[in-house]
Image (cartoon, rainbow, N blue to C red):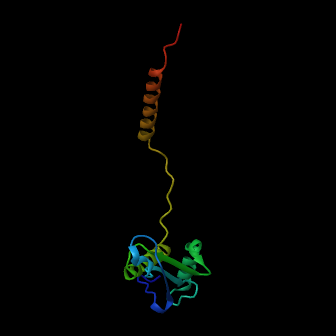
């Protein structure tokens, strides 16, 4: 896998629409909401291994092999474009990241087992002291 993956501009698609939220009358006239889409299945910058990895890991976000991210946090379309690019980059980085090492199960230490039992005994004693005295 390549350490620096650069997606060419020609592979990215943009769609703009009106955004909800703050902005007053300006929000009714400008297309500040941004949708960025990239076809993972047909991308030329990915190796076959990278493509398969992204297709499996991002499968829940893909529609016909295309991943879409949306940004409408800012009032400016330009800022929302930057946010959408960052979101796509984060998705791809996470999708191509190496799997973390599997956790090996271990037994609790003798000391931790002893402390665990001591806490249980203390809790039991506390509850016992709260009970009504037994009537003899």
Residue 28 horizontal/vertical position (percent): 44, 78
Above or below for 62 versus 108: below
Q: Residue at x 46, y 87 (%)?
A: 7
- Height in image: 23 above or below 119? below
Q: Name the foreground residue: 25 vs 42.
A: 25
Closer to the camera, 60 or 37?
A: 37
Locate residue 25: give its quadrant. bottom left
Percent of width and height locating residue 19: 46, 75
The residue at 54%/79% (across/down) is 67
The single residue placed furthest to the bottom in the displayed view is 10
Residue 1, image x and y in percent? 47, 82
- Kindly give the residue lying farthest to the right in the view shown: 64
Judging depth in this view, the residue of 67 and 15 nearest the camera is 15
Labels in figure, total = 0
**Image quarter of residue 112:** top left
**Residue at the top extreme, as displayed:** 136
Using the rendered view, name the quadrant where residue 55 is placed. bottom right
Q: Position of residue 77 (x, y in %)?
A: 40, 81
Q: Please tell me whether residue 107 is drawn above or below residue 93 in the rendered image.
A: above
The one of 73 and 68 positioned closer to us in this rendering: 73
């Amino acid at each position: 896998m390549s350490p620096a993956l650069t997606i060419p501009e020609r592979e990215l698609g943009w769609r703009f629409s009106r955004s909800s939220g703050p902005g007053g009358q300006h929000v009714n006239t400008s297309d500040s909401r941004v949708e960025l889409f990239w076809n993972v299945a047909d991308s030329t910058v990915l190796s076959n291994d990278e493509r398969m990895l992204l297709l499996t890991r991002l499968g829940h976000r893909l529609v016909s092999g295309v991943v879409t991210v949306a940004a409408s946090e800012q009032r400016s379309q330009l800022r929302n474009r930057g946010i959408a690019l960052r979101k796509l980059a984060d998705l791809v980085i996470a999708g191509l990241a190496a799997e973390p090492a599997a956790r090996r199960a271990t037994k609790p230490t003798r000391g931790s087992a002893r402390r665990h039992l001591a806490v249980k005994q203390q809790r039991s004693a506390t509850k016992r002291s709260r009970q009504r005295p037994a009537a003899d």
